[in-house]
Image: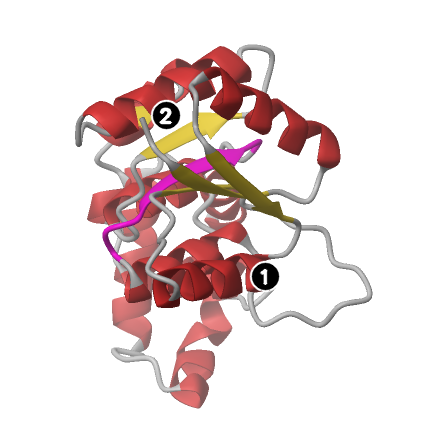
Amino acid sequence: MFIKVLIAEDIDFNNIAVVQVLEELAVSKIDYTKYCDDALTKIKKAYLDQEPYQLLITDLSFKADYRVNKLDSGEELIAAVKHLYPEIKVIAFSIENKSFLIKSLFEKLDINAFVMKGRNSIPELKKAILNTFQNDEKYISPELNHILQNKTVQEIDNYDLELIKYLSIGVSQESMEAKFKEVGINPSSKSTIEKRITKLKIYFNANNPTHLVAIAKDLGLV
C-alpha cells in the first residue's frame, strides 16, 4: 500500500472521510492542505527531502477566500504536479460531472482515477486507491463509465471550442468573423465559420447556435 499520501481538500468533512479511508488501508503518512499552492509546496519539499508523496488525492473546486493563490483549482494543481513529477499517482475526488473536463483529466493530465462525491463515494474511493496502487488501469466511478467510452470529445478540436466559447458569451454568428480576426484566430472567414457551426449543430443535434451552446455547457465544453 502507499506509504505517503497528500490530500488537497478545502472542506473539513470531506477531508476527514478521505483520511478515514486511508487509515483503513494502513497508509502510514497522511498529510492534507486546504490550498492548491500549499499542496504543490508540500510536494516540492517532499522531493527535496527525498521523501516524496506517492499519491495525491485532490478536489477540483476550491472556494476563494482572503488568500491570493497562483493555483485556484484542482485541475491547475494536477497540471503543475504532473509537469514536475509525472510519476505521482493522482486521484480526483470531486462533485464535478462534466464529461469534457473529466475526460481531459484522464487524457491530457493522465490522472489515475476519478471518484465522484456522493452517497457511495467512500467505498468507491477505497476501490480507486486500491486499484491505483495495484495496477495502471484507470478507475472512474461506475455512473461515469460512459465518459471514457464517449468519442465526442476526441472529435472536437480547439477551433470548435473557441467558436462555442464566443457563441456562449454573446458573439453572434454574423459577428464571429470580425471577432476571430480581432483575437487572431484562423481561419476567420465567414464561410469557414458557417460550415463549422453547421457541422457542430449536426454533430450535437442542435436546432440553432443557442441550443448548441446549451448542449456544450451540459457536456462541460464551455
Where 66 sits versus 142, above or below? below
Q: Residue at x 57, y 64 (%)?
A: 37
The answer to which image quadrant residue 181 occupies is: bottom left
Name which residue type carries label 2: Ile
Q: CA distance from mark 1 to mark 2?
A: 22 Å
Q: Report x, y in % for residue 94.
A: 54, 34
Predominant secondary structure, magenta span: strand
Q: Residue at x 55, y 65 (%)?
A: 71
Of 221 and 168, which appears nearest the observer?
221
Residue 161: tell me if it is visible: no
Q: Is the N terminus in the top left, top right, bottom left or bottom right quadrant?
A: top left
* Secondary-structure class at tag 2: helix
Q: Which residues are magenta?
A: 86-95
The answer to which image quadrant residue 11 occupies is: top right
Q: Which residue is mark 2?
A: 129
Where 93 sits versus 49, above or below? above
Of 85 and 165, which appears nearest the observer?
85
- Say which mark, if any, is on residue 38: 1
Where 92 sits versus 126, above or below? below
Where 130 sits versus 156, above or below? above
Q: Report x, y in % for residue 118.
A: 59, 18
**Label 1 or label 2, whichever comes before in sequence order:** 1
Instruction: Tell me, yes or no, whether the highlighted magenta stretch contains residue 92.
Output: yes
Q: Residue at x 37, y 68 (%)?
A: 48
